[in-house]
């Protein structure tokens, strides 16, 4: 991927169903964080100088999230460079409002979104599986109760229930209990990846050629590295780290979290980077 000429496209579906598409040359600041396997990704955007008509319909008060059967406002953020701008974030708008600070000329539209947080908060399961059901099939059945979330990948859980088993309660909580916290949602897909398994990603190596910045840091069993904005990363993927400055860290890892932050603008120069968190793979099984 040639990392020049930054591009982006932000798609927001309003409460009335109208799709607003925002792209270059408008300036956008963004901060997108995937903390760990058990936490929904969060994204914060600031878009500068949207038209008044767009500002008027991109509105969401936090209190609306807690209304019975709230209207969902889907949001998608594609970003990258001149030759590729893949999907970086998809989720639901929780807060959106526009303002102009005192003494300033720019109108700012601020948006906070979570990756299918509504499905995790409001998903409910109530069913019984017969004796002989495998643990993996129970996981798949629970995932089916997450509205708006499709199946990504679930590792093998061959254990079987000797008696009929009932699942009742919040679906995401049940999935985390059943999988030991390995359940997560990324790009609108549900994953449960056991230690040693990984999913394939488009980016296979982190080194100076792919934009590695500075020297990676080791804290217990987690390695943190900074790279030039890398939109191809996905949670759960295998990646090889190659650094000349800290060669003892060179190995295969699984991505357990990352943060994208910076500014894309045709008008002003802004920094943009990705911070990646990785754990070493003891043994690897491609899935």
Image (spheres, helix red, strand yellow):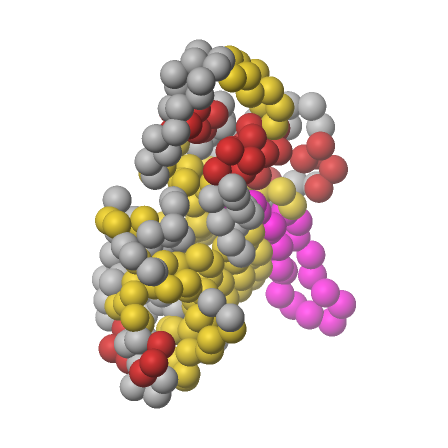
Can the viewer see residue 190?
yes
Q: Which corner quadrant holds the C terminus?
A: top left
Of residues 284 and 122, which is closer to you in this image?
284
Where residue 129 appears, as percent x and y from the top left, is: 46, 14
Of residues 3 and 264, which is closer to you in this image?
3
Of residues 188 and 206, which is closer to you in this image?
206
| Image position of 85 (left or right of 34) | left
Is residue 124 depicted above or below 79 in this figure?
above
The residue drawn where x is 58% and y is 23% is 124
Image label count: 0
The residue drawn where x is 57% and y is 42% is 93
The residue drawn where x is 53% and y is 61% is 31
Where residue 126 appears, as percent x and y from the top left, is: 56, 16
Where residue 215 appears, as percent x and y from the top left, is: 41, 83
Can the viewer see residue 25?
no
Residue sitting farthest toward the bottom? 245
Q: Magenta span has 103?
A: yes
Q: Magenta span has 46?
A: no
Where residue 86 appears, as percent x and y from the top left, is: 32, 53
Q: Which corner quadrant holds the N terminus?
A: bottom left
The residue drawn where x is 41% and y is 63% is 279
Is residue 122 depicted above or below 12 in this figure?
above
- Residue stretch rendered in magenta on the structure: 96-116
Is residue 131 depicted above or below 227 in this figure?
above
């Amino acid at each position: 991927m040639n990392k020049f000429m930054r591009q982006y496209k932000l798609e927001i579906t309003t409460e009335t169903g109208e799709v607003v598409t925002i792209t270059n040359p408008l300036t956008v600041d963004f901060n997108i964080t995937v903390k760990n396997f058990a936490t929904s990704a969060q994204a914060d955007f600031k878009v500068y100088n949207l038209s008044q008509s767009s500002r008027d319909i991109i509105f969401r008060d936090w209190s609306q999230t807690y209304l019975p059967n709230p209207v969902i406002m889907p949001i998608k953020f594609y970003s990258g460079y001149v030759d590729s701008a893949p999907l970086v974030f998809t989720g639901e708008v929780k807060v959106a409002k526009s303002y102009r600070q005192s003494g300033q000329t720019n109108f700012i539209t601020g948006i906070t979104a979570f990756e299918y947080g509504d499905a995790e908060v409001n998903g409910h399961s109530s069913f019984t599986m017969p004796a002989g059901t495998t643990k993996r099939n129970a996981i798949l059945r629970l995932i089916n109760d997450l509205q708006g979330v499709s199946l990504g990948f679930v590792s093998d859980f061959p254990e079987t229930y000797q008696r009929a088993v009932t699942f009742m309660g919040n679906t995401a909580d049940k999935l985390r209990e059943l999988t030991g916290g390995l359940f997560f949602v990324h790009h609108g897909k549900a994953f449960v990846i056991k230690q040693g398994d990984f999913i394939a990603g488009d980016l296979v190596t982190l080194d100076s050629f792919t934009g590695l910045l500075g020297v990676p840091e080791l804290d217990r069993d987690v390695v943190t590295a900074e790279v030039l904005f890398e939109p191809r990363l996905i949670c759960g993927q295998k990646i090889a780290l190659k650094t000349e400055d800290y060669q003892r860290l060179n190995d295969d890892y699984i991505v357990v979290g990352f943060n994208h932050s910076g500014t894309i603008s045709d008008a002003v120069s802004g920094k943009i980077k990705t911070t990646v968190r990785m754990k070493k793979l003891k043994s690897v099984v491609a899935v």
